[in-house]
Amino acid sequence: MSFDSDEIAQRKQWIGGMFGRAASTYDHVGPPFFSHFGKHLVDIAKISPSSNVLDVATGRGALLFPAAEAVGRDGQVVGVDLSEAMIQETSKELARQNMSLKVAVRQMDAENLQFSDELFDYVLCGFAIFFFPQLNRAMSEFYRVLKPNGHICVSTWDTLFYEQWGWFDALIKEYLPPEPTPSEKSGSTSEPVFDTPEGLESILASAGFENIQIFSEAKEFVYSANEDYWLSLWSHGAREVLEKIEQVRGKEGLARFRSDVFREVEGLRKEDGLHQMFSTLIGLANKPQT
Protein backbone atom coordinates (compact mmCIF):
# COMPACT_ATOMS: atom_id res chain seq x y z
CA MET A 1 0.00 0.00 0.00
CA SER A 2 1.30 3.48 -0.87
CA PHE A 3 0.87 6.59 1.24
CA ASP A 4 0.51 10.16 0.00
CA SER A 5 2.21 13.20 1.45
CA ASP A 6 -0.07 15.66 3.22
CA GLU A 7 0.13 18.03 0.25
CA ILE A 8 -0.87 15.36 -2.25
CA ALA A 9 -3.59 13.99 0.01
CA GLN A 10 -5.04 17.49 0.37
CA ARG A 11 -4.92 17.99 -3.39
CA LYS A 12 -6.79 14.74 -3.97
CA GLN A 13 -9.34 15.66 -1.34
CA TRP A 14 -9.91 19.00 -3.08
CA ILE A 15 -10.21 17.41 -6.54
CA GLY A 16 -12.65 14.78 -5.30
CA GLY A 17 -14.69 17.37 -3.47
CA MET A 18 -14.75 19.82 -6.37
CA PHE A 19 -15.91 17.18 -8.85
CA GLY A 20 -18.35 15.91 -6.27
CA ARG A 21 -19.93 19.35 -6.12
CA ALA A 22 -20.11 19.32 -9.93
CA ALA A 23 -21.45 15.77 -10.19
CA SER A 24 -25.16 16.56 -10.49
CA THR A 25 -24.65 18.63 -13.65
CA TYR A 26 -21.42 17.16 -15.03
CA ASP A 27 -21.87 16.62 -18.80
CA HIS A 28 -25.58 17.39 -18.32
CA VAL A 29 -25.61 21.14 -18.94
CA GLY A 30 -24.36 22.87 -22.06
CA PRO A 31 -23.32 20.88 -25.13
CA PRO A 32 -22.39 17.25 -24.35
CA PHE A 33 -18.74 17.44 -25.40
CA PHE A 34 -17.55 14.82 -22.90
CA SER A 35 -20.06 12.30 -24.24
CA HIS A 36 -19.08 13.08 -27.83
CA PHE A 37 -15.36 12.64 -27.26
CA GLY A 38 -15.96 9.65 -24.99
CA LYS A 39 -17.74 7.80 -27.80
CA HIS A 40 -14.93 8.80 -30.17
CA LEU A 41 -12.29 7.41 -27.80
CA VAL A 42 -14.13 4.10 -27.47
CA ASP A 43 -14.38 3.89 -31.26
CA ILE A 44 -10.61 4.44 -31.57
CA ALA A 45 -9.89 1.82 -28.90
CA LYS A 46 -11.81 -0.77 -30.98
CA ILE A 47 -12.91 -2.68 -27.91
CA SER A 48 -13.54 -6.34 -28.68
CA PRO A 49 -16.75 -8.08 -27.59
CA SER A 50 -16.48 -10.01 -24.31
CA SER A 51 -13.59 -7.80 -23.10
CA ASN A 52 -12.92 -6.73 -19.54
CA VAL A 53 -12.60 -2.92 -19.47
CA LEU A 54 -11.55 -0.42 -16.81
CA ASP A 55 -12.63 3.21 -17.16
CA VAL A 56 -10.58 5.45 -14.84
CA ALA A 57 -12.07 8.80 -13.76
CA THR A 58 -15.38 7.63 -15.15
CA GLY A 59 -17.36 10.74 -14.13
CA ARG A 60 -20.92 10.44 -15.40
CA GLY A 61 -20.00 7.66 -17.82
CA ALA A 62 -18.97 9.41 -21.04
CA LEU A 63 -16.70 6.43 -21.80
CA LEU A 64 -18.39 3.90 -19.55
CA PHE A 65 -21.66 3.62 -21.46
CA PRO A 66 -20.21 3.32 -24.99
CA ALA A 67 -17.64 0.83 -23.63
CA ALA A 68 -20.48 -1.24 -22.16
CA GLU A 69 -22.14 -1.29 -25.55
CA ALA A 70 -18.87 -2.34 -27.20
CA VAL A 71 -18.18 -5.32 -24.91
CA GLY A 72 -21.59 -6.80 -25.57
CA ARG A 73 -23.53 -9.27 -23.48
CA ASP A 74 -20.52 -11.27 -22.26
CA GLY A 75 -18.16 -8.40 -21.45
CA GLN A 76 -17.60 -6.48 -18.24
CA VAL A 77 -16.88 -2.79 -17.62
CA VAL A 78 -15.77 -1.22 -14.34
CA GLY A 79 -15.68 2.53 -13.83
CA VAL A 80 -13.75 4.14 -10.98
CA ASP A 81 -13.69 7.74 -9.82
CA LEU A 82 -12.17 9.68 -6.96
CA SER A 83 -15.51 11.38 -6.31
CA GLU A 84 -18.10 9.39 -4.40
CA ALA A 85 -20.80 11.76 -5.65
CA MET A 86 -19.89 10.97 -9.28
CA ILE A 87 -20.19 7.26 -8.49
CA GLN A 88 -23.60 7.79 -6.90
CA GLU A 89 -24.93 9.73 -9.89
CA THR A 90 -23.61 7.18 -12.39
CA SER A 91 -24.97 4.30 -10.32
CA LYS A 92 -28.44 5.83 -10.60
CA GLU A 93 -28.12 5.96 -14.37
CA LEU A 94 -26.88 2.37 -14.56
CA ALA A 95 -29.90 1.26 -12.53
CA ARG A 96 -32.24 3.29 -14.71
CA GLN A 97 -30.85 1.61 -17.83
CA ASN A 98 -30.77 -1.86 -16.22
CA MET A 99 -27.02 -2.17 -16.86
CA SER A 100 -25.85 -2.99 -13.33
CA LEU A 101 -25.15 -6.66 -14.11
CA LYS A 102 -22.31 -6.03 -16.59
CA VAL A 103 -21.23 -2.55 -15.48
CA ALA A 104 -19.97 -1.65 -12.03
CA VAL A 105 -18.74 1.65 -10.60
CA ARG A 106 -16.54 2.13 -7.54
CA GLN A 107 -14.98 5.03 -5.67
CA MET A 108 -11.22 4.65 -6.10
CA ASP A 109 -7.95 6.54 -6.46
CA ALA A 110 -6.35 6.16 -9.91
CA GLU A 111 -2.93 6.15 -8.26
CA ASN A 112 -3.84 3.17 -6.07
CA LEU A 113 -6.11 0.86 -8.05
CA GLN A 114 -7.65 -1.91 -5.95
CA PHE A 115 -7.43 -4.58 -8.65
CA SER A 116 -5.16 -7.55 -9.17
CA ASP A 117 -2.39 -7.54 -11.76
CA GLU A 118 -3.15 -8.17 -15.45
CA LEU A 119 -6.92 -8.17 -15.02
CA PHE A 120 -8.17 -5.91 -17.83
CA ASP A 121 -8.04 -6.07 -21.61
CA TYR A 122 -8.46 -2.29 -21.87
CA VAL A 123 -7.82 0.69 -19.62
CA LEU A 124 -9.54 3.93 -20.65
CA CYS A 125 -9.15 7.42 -19.22
CA GLY A 126 -10.86 10.50 -20.63
CA PHE A 127 -9.59 14.03 -19.87
CA ALA A 128 -8.20 13.17 -16.46
CA ILE A 129 -4.48 12.34 -16.56
CA PHE A 130 -3.63 16.04 -16.14
CA PHE A 131 -5.46 16.03 -12.78
CA PHE A 132 -3.37 13.24 -11.22
CA PRO A 133 -0.92 14.72 -8.67
CA GLN A 134 1.46 11.80 -9.28
CA LEU A 135 1.05 10.94 -12.95
CA ASN A 136 3.85 8.38 -12.98
CA ARG A 137 2.14 6.42 -10.21
CA ALA A 138 -1.19 6.44 -12.04
CA MET A 139 0.38 5.33 -15.31
CA SER A 140 2.23 2.58 -13.48
CA GLU A 141 -1.08 1.39 -12.06
CA PHE A 142 -2.67 1.44 -15.53
CA TYR A 143 0.21 -0.70 -16.77
CA ARG A 144 0.00 -3.11 -13.84
CA VAL A 145 -3.70 -3.94 -14.18
CA LEU A 146 -3.53 -4.43 -17.95
CA LYS A 147 -3.07 -7.89 -19.38
CA PRO A 148 -0.02 -8.42 -21.64
CA ASN A 149 -0.92 -6.97 -25.05
CA GLY A 150 -3.83 -5.13 -23.41
CA HIS A 151 -4.63 -1.66 -24.68
CA ILE A 152 -4.63 1.75 -23.03
CA CYS A 153 -6.52 4.68 -24.53
CA VAL A 154 -6.44 8.17 -23.01
CA SER A 155 -7.56 11.63 -24.10
CA THR A 156 -6.31 15.14 -23.38
CA TRP A 157 -6.95 18.65 -24.67
CA ASP A 158 -4.46 19.85 -27.27
CA THR A 159 -2.61 23.14 -27.75
CA LEU A 160 -5.32 24.66 -29.94
CA PHE A 161 -7.87 24.08 -27.19
CA TYR A 162 -5.82 26.08 -24.71
CA GLU A 163 -5.25 28.81 -27.27
CA GLN A 164 -9.01 29.04 -27.74
CA TRP A 165 -9.33 29.53 -23.97
CA GLY A 166 -6.51 32.07 -23.73
CA TRP A 167 -8.93 34.88 -22.94
CA PHE A 168 -10.26 32.89 -19.98
CA ASP A 169 -6.78 32.33 -18.55
CA ALA A 170 -5.97 36.02 -18.97
CA LEU A 171 -9.16 36.96 -17.14
CA ILE A 172 -8.36 34.59 -14.28
CA LYS A 173 -5.04 36.35 -13.73
CA GLU A 174 -6.92 39.57 -13.01
CA TYR A 175 -8.78 37.89 -10.14
CA LEU A 176 -6.39 35.35 -8.62
CA PRO A 177 -2.77 35.50 -7.44
CA PRO A 178 -0.35 33.79 -9.83
CA GLU A 179 0.28 30.07 -9.43
CA PRO A 180 3.84 28.97 -8.57
CA THR A 181 5.92 28.16 -11.64
CA PRO A 182 7.20 24.56 -11.97
CA SER A 183 10.69 25.66 -10.83
CA GLU A 184 9.19 27.00 -7.62
CA LYS A 185 7.52 23.72 -6.67
CA SER A 186 9.48 21.61 -4.23
CA GLY A 187 10.96 18.45 -5.72
CA SER A 188 9.90 19.47 -9.21
CA THR A 189 11.44 17.79 -12.22
CA SER A 190 10.53 18.20 -15.87
CA GLU A 191 6.78 18.62 -16.19
CA PRO A 192 4.77 16.26 -18.43
CA VAL A 193 3.37 17.81 -21.60
CA PHE A 194 -0.26 16.88 -22.17
CA ASP A 195 -1.26 19.13 -25.08
CA THR A 196 1.02 18.01 -27.93
CA PRO A 197 1.22 14.68 -29.79
CA GLU A 198 4.89 14.41 -28.82
CA GLY A 199 4.11 15.07 -25.15
CA LEU A 200 1.31 12.53 -24.96
CA GLU A 201 3.44 9.95 -26.77
CA SER A 202 6.25 10.55 -24.26
CA ILE A 203 3.87 10.02 -21.31
CA LEU A 204 2.74 6.67 -22.69
CA ALA A 205 6.24 5.56 -23.70
CA SER A 206 7.70 6.48 -20.31
CA ALA A 207 5.13 4.22 -18.67
CA GLY A 208 6.34 1.28 -20.79
CA PHE A 209 3.60 1.18 -23.42
CA GLU A 210 4.42 0.49 -27.06
CA ASN A 211 2.89 0.72 -30.55
CA ILE A 212 1.72 4.21 -29.65
CA GLN A 213 -0.67 6.02 -31.97
CA ILE A 214 -1.85 9.59 -31.47
CA PHE A 215 -5.14 10.79 -32.97
CA SER A 216 -6.61 14.27 -33.02
CA GLU A 217 -10.14 15.56 -33.35
CA ALA A 218 -11.61 19.05 -33.22
CA LYS A 219 -15.31 19.81 -33.08
CA GLU A 220 -17.29 22.99 -32.59
CA PHE A 221 -20.03 23.01 -29.95
CA VAL A 222 -22.80 25.57 -29.47
CA TYR A 223 -24.04 27.06 -26.19
CA SER A 224 -27.60 28.31 -26.51
CA ALA A 225 -27.12 31.36 -24.26
CA ASN A 226 -24.73 33.11 -21.89
CA GLU A 227 -26.25 31.44 -18.85
CA ASP A 228 -25.84 28.06 -20.52
CA TYR A 229 -22.14 28.86 -20.90
CA TRP A 230 -21.80 29.95 -17.27
CA LEU A 231 -23.58 26.89 -15.87
CA SER A 232 -21.38 24.65 -18.00
CA LEU A 233 -18.25 26.19 -16.43
CA TRP A 234 -19.54 25.12 -13.02
CA SER A 235 -20.13 21.57 -14.25
CA HIS A 236 -16.53 20.54 -15.03
CA GLY A 237 -12.91 21.29 -14.12
CA ALA A 238 -13.29 25.06 -14.59
CA ARG A 239 -15.33 24.98 -11.38
CA GLU A 240 -12.05 24.92 -9.46
CA VAL A 241 -11.22 28.42 -10.70
CA LEU A 242 -14.71 29.75 -10.01
CA GLU A 243 -14.65 28.45 -6.46
CA LYS A 244 -11.22 29.98 -5.86
CA ILE A 245 -12.37 33.36 -7.19
CA GLU A 246 -15.37 33.27 -4.87
CA GLN A 247 -13.13 32.31 -1.98
CA VAL A 248 -10.58 35.07 -2.67
CA ARG A 249 -12.84 37.84 -4.05
CA GLY A 250 -16.16 37.01 -2.46
CA LYS A 251 -19.56 36.81 -4.10
CA GLU A 252 -19.26 40.33 -5.51
CA GLY A 253 -15.92 39.46 -7.10
CA LEU A 254 -17.40 36.32 -8.63
CA ALA A 255 -20.31 38.38 -9.99
CA ARG A 256 -17.83 40.77 -11.63
CA PHE A 257 -15.96 37.81 -13.10
CA ARG A 258 -19.22 36.46 -14.50
CA SER A 259 -19.92 39.81 -16.16
CA ASP A 260 -16.42 39.84 -17.63
CA VAL A 261 -16.90 36.32 -18.98
CA PHE A 262 -20.17 37.34 -20.64
CA ARG A 263 -18.42 40.32 -22.22
CA GLU A 264 -15.65 38.12 -23.61
CA VAL A 265 -17.90 35.39 -25.00
CA GLU A 266 -19.73 37.90 -27.18
CA GLY A 267 -16.89 37.28 -29.60
CA LEU A 268 -18.06 33.67 -29.88
CA ARG A 269 -21.64 34.56 -30.73
CA LYS A 270 -23.36 33.55 -33.96
CA GLU A 271 -27.05 33.47 -34.81
CA ASP A 272 -27.72 30.19 -33.01
CA GLY A 273 -25.58 30.79 -29.91
CA LEU A 274 -22.01 30.83 -28.62
CA HIS A 275 -19.63 28.71 -30.68
CA GLN A 276 -16.63 27.12 -28.96
CA MET A 277 -14.07 24.86 -30.65
CA PHE A 278 -12.88 21.86 -28.64
CA SER A 279 -9.75 20.12 -29.91
CA THR A 280 -8.40 16.90 -28.45
CA LEU A 281 -5.66 14.31 -28.58
CA ILE A 282 -6.25 10.60 -28.04
CA GLY A 283 -3.38 8.23 -27.35
CA LEU A 284 -3.75 4.52 -28.05
CA ALA A 285 -1.05 2.01 -27.07
CA ASN A 286 -0.59 -1.48 -25.73
CA LYS A 287 1.31 -3.25 -22.97
CA PRO A 288 4.12 -5.45 -24.35
CA GLN A 289 3.33 -9.13 -24.69
CA THR A 290 6.28 -10.18 -22.56
Image (cartoon, grey):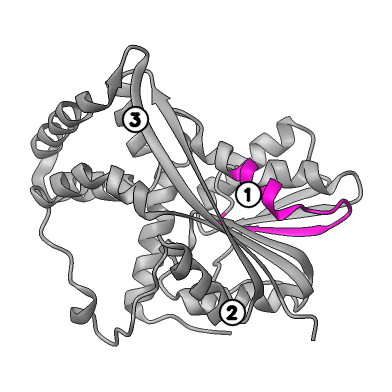
**Residue 55, magenta (yes or no):** yes
The three-letter code of the residue at mark 2 reads Ser
Check disc 2: other Cα within 10 Å, few if <14, some if 14-19, many if 20+. some
Residue at image point 31% right, 50% down:
162
Residue that mark 2 sits on: 140
Query: What mark, if any, has residue 41 been given in the picture?
Result: 1
**Residue 9, magenta (yes or no):** no
Residue at image point 34% right, 69% down:
10
Residue that mark 3 sits on: 231
Relative to 218, does residue 248 appear above or below in the rendering? below
Res 39 → quadrant: top right
Image coords of residue 107 (percent x, y): 59, 58
Q: Which mark's residue is nearer the viewer, 3 or 1? A: 1
Q: CA distance from mark 2 to mark 3?
A: 36 Å
Query: Which contiguous range is marked in magenta?
Result: 38-57
Check disc 1: other Cα within 10 Å, few if <14, some if 14-19, many if 20+. many
Q: Which mark's residue is nearer the viewer, 2 or 1? A: 1
Looking at the image, tell me whether mark 2 or mark 3 is earlier in sequence order. Answer: 2
Image coords of residue 74 (percent x, y): 91, 50
Residue 172 in sight here: yes
Q: CA distance from mark 3 to mark 1?
A: 25 Å
Relative to 28, does residue 10 appear above or below in the rendering? below
Relative to 56, does residue 132 appear above or below in the rendering? below
